[in-house]
Image (cartoon, coloured by chain):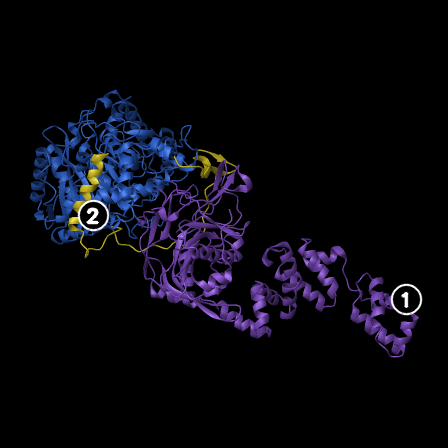
Chain colours: A yellow, B blue, C purple
Amino acid sequence: MQGELNVIADSINKVQEVASDDVEPTANPVPLEAYLRPDVPETPLRREDALAGAPATESGMFVAPRILGGEA
Amino acid sequence: MTEANELVKLTAAQMAEKIRNKEVSSRELVDAELNVIDAAEPDIHAFLHVSADEARAQADAFDAKNAKGETEGLPELAGVPIAIKDMIVTKGIETTAASKILEGWIPPYDATVITKLKAAGMPLLGKTNLDEFAQGSSTEHSAFGPTHNPWDTSRVPGGSGGGSASAVAAFEAPLALGTDTGGSIRQPGSLTGTVGVKPTYGGVSRFGAIAMASSLDQIGPVSRNVLDSALLQEVIGGHDVRDSTSIPMDVPPIVKAAREGYKRDLKGMKVGLVKQLGGDGYQPGVEARFNEAVKLLQSMGAEVVEVDCPHFDYALAAYYIVMPSEVSSNLARYDGMRYGLRVMPPEGVPQTAANMMAYTREAGFGDEVKRRIILGIYALSAGYYDAWYGSAQKVRTLIIDDFKKAFEQADVLIAPTSPTTAFKFGEKMNDPLTMYMSDVATIPANMAGTPAMSIPAGLSDDGLPVGFQFMAPQKHDEQMYKPAAALEAALEEQWGGPVWQSLKTPWLDSAK
Amino acid sequence: MAEKLMKYSDAVKEFDPVFGLETHVELCTQTKLFCPAHEEFGAEPNTELSPVSLGLPGSLPVVNKTAVDFAIKLGLALHCQINEWSQFARKNYFYPDMPRDYQISQFDKPTNGNGYLDVELDDGTIFRVPIERAHIEDDAGKNTHVGGADGRIEGADHSLVDYNRAGVPLIEIVTKPVEGGGDRVPEIADAYMRAIRDIVRALGISHGRMEQGNMRADVNISLRKKGTTKLGTRSETKNVNTFRGIKKTLQYEIRRQAAILDEGGEILQETRHWDEATQTTAGGRVKSDANDYRYFPDPDLVMLHITQEHIDEIAKTMPEMPRERRTRLQKEWGLTDLQMRDLINADALDLVEETVKDGASATGARKWWLGEISRVANERGVSLEELPITPADVAEVEKLVAAGKLNDKLAKQTVTGVLAGEGTPDEVVKKHNYQVVSDDGALEKAIDEALAANPDVAEKLKSGNMKPMGAIIGAVMRATHGQADAKAVSSLVIKKMKG
């Protein structure tokens, strides 16, 4: 793992050489403005399809182990 | 060599023509490819899942339509089979991203590109192998075993899309889809002597492409020649309202550009040789093939100029901040709740949801994926965001500016695709840094969203394929297709045929 | 363990409370914020999902235009600066009801910034609440806890997750720290929440029903020693979902914090929650401030561009705002300030307006909603809207009265029947055969019998002394099982005496 952490440490040093205050950051490489979707419903997933991949289900719902109860 | 074996060596365009002329059916093509797959897979392992039944049914449906003359208006590649990188979601066909955490997952929906392929009547042969969640450069990080390079099965096919590249190189499929985040289509193309294209970011819908790093990921074609890739990109490209980063424009005239290129006239075209991509770290055999190809471009009338892209030297560093950051967030959803693997904590550990999530991810993800998630979590953490992620995003701006300036001097940029030819299994597994260097020449295009492609430039002195990379301005993919097609034609004339003439294919002899 | 509390009046004498509210308003769009799945309250679990709202691998978010339009509407109503460019970010954290394990919200570039809302207090005072931002985000699913007591998370064996709500659009309205409220802070917060509720309903952007979870608030409060300028440490009470709860949370926290500070103690910066059962706040389990959400711009979504033309278009569709509407209605209905406030405080304004629209008089509508119906609501501990009676029902009863088909007593019985779930007024009337006896023959017979049975009364009436009329009416009512119209009886008696 140390080697990989060095990767990021080196990367950070390297990018900071040129990332000066006057440079704008780029989040999306191709500048676009958001397409706004019309508010029209489409057929939802069938419940059995939605649940088909679930590791555990009960009464049409996904089962989560208990949420509280101490940290590992 | 049987007739069927001759069939699988055709280009996709030739197969399509035979289908149109009713010389061959889609079903015959599918059966021929399935035979090759059967014979080749023990040596190659390009596929994680072969969807033989689905492919045959799709082919039969297409042939029935074709017999009734109902295929009018379909894309040129109608009826030609294709393999799909297992990073792309296919309804009813297991999709795993080569990860244990998704093993057995049957998606209830199709990616947009799959919907388009189905509409085009193109049968899906199966799902190809990759580095887990497309993270790697050798396909050795697949949870289900590596893919072998058909040119030398003791070597890697590159990655992450080694499965798609090997499948196409080994004649298991005429075409495949890949995803390219830092070179995952182009670098395997280079290492397997195939063509691999990363279109403009947003040129092909990402809806249904399992996300690795959303701002870098792009689906693209894999084929054995330039025209086939152009034809395939035309099928899968274009605006998709289900992907907010999809560009609202038609596919650029890439097929026309490729056909134009085959005339081998590049007069008036300026080709920019990127100063930063070459020299130290590039194998002499790679540089030699590259330089010869540059001369060929010149001989066809192209003017070669050297362009300076100083910030390309920072691309790899910025990539290794942006990419893991997005990975850490995109892969958070694999938590054992809704799909895929669930591992409960061992006895004695509280049986809570959070612990279940942690144990699931510990068991379900491989080392490379975990490595990148941890790096990403660091890079995004409060107090470090500006220095890390913020700085890396600034470097993106600088790389984009470098591209812009370069494209003021040249119509298309060129560089070797990969600094090396295919390496041996295990050679770089314990040295991630060297592995990461495999993508040094492909990453700038991902960081800037520009289109780029790799085509075979011949064999290095070690007898292994070398890739030649073209990069074009955003939304102008056609500007790389033309010189790529021209170079392909010129090289094939020199070689007296495609690069794969030199490929030994014992599995074809054993195919039924 | 009960916490030490200072008397409220002492607390606000010693300290200036500074509060803030983060109000989540669920938008009533047809589809979710980032996918075309429909969402309706009370649907079968996990039947309103798309690959996007279930966070399936490969799925991508696309912004709902109506949600953006609604955000602009609210921005205009709250006098916000509507930013030309806004951005969605990922807020990363794990919780079983969060399908992607990150929420998509707006972080440093919200759609609406910097506004205010003037709220009217009980005595007519106007107080200006400054707004920091109103941003768009998506909701999580719902957990049902199984195996513990009363469905509580504590002691539960496991939880069942329904993702129907996951992806439903929310607007989070964040106030700036509200200063200068003094002892009226709980009242101001209450008036603010009600004003927000009225606005979102008037705009048609949310059902604004707290009891259905359409609105909930995080309540922040800190105390500052009078005469000093340093802000105290704040507590944050999460997800308070009743008006009363918000008011009481503030009252409680002011008293609790004052008691601690008075003894020289320190307020913990913590997340608390309001416990309706004990009417107290309790220290939260999760210290949210310790979480690092690793916010970063969502690379799956591009910048949201809102042009001035878009804003202008929305501005044209803005309805009358609640305060203007109240002024107008008060005038139309001829009510005094006090009567109007009673109506508003009873949450009956919309209901009365609807009832009047359905044909009742304003006086009649007010009488029912503030009278018998309010009484029953109180008795049952529910809101007026939760009762099984609609404005149309009330208007129907009023029509029957006006038509002389029901008298006051029968009308009240009819309303009681509707409230008991016996059906519409028509159905209740039919079921019980309520009808004013207007058949003159039957009435005359009853009157004659009553006069005959009370000769002394008959004598007085005949001589022009109408005082004992009540005795005759009472007797007639008894004879007709209350179905006679008192007015009709008295005019018939008078006719007889004169005859």
Residue at image mark 1: C449
Q: Position of residue B202 (x, y in %)?
A: 28, 48
In this rendering, would C461 be left or right of C62?
A: right
- In percent of the image, x 34 and y 35: which residue is there? B123
* Quadrant in the rendering for residue C409: bottom right
Above or below residue C371? Residue B158 is above
Q: Nearer the viewer, residue C112 or C403?
A: C112
* Chain containing mark 2: B
In this rendering, would C402 be left or right of B74?
A: right
Above or below residue B373? Residue C33 is below
Q: Within 10 angstroms of label 2, few (less than 14), some, or many (20 or more) residues?
A: many
Above or below residue C262? Residue B46 is above
Front disc: 1 or 2: 1
Residue at image mark 2: B478
Q: Can residue B79 be seen here?
A: yes
Quarter of the rendering occupied by the C terminus of chain C: bottom right
Q: Residue furthest top?
A: B510
Regarding mark 1 in the picture, which secondary structure is present there? helix
- Three-letter amino acid code at disc 2? Glu
Q: Position of residue B227 (x, y in %)?
A: 21, 40
Q: Nearer the viewer, residue A71 or B452?
A: A71
In this rendering, would C320 be left or right of B483?
A: right
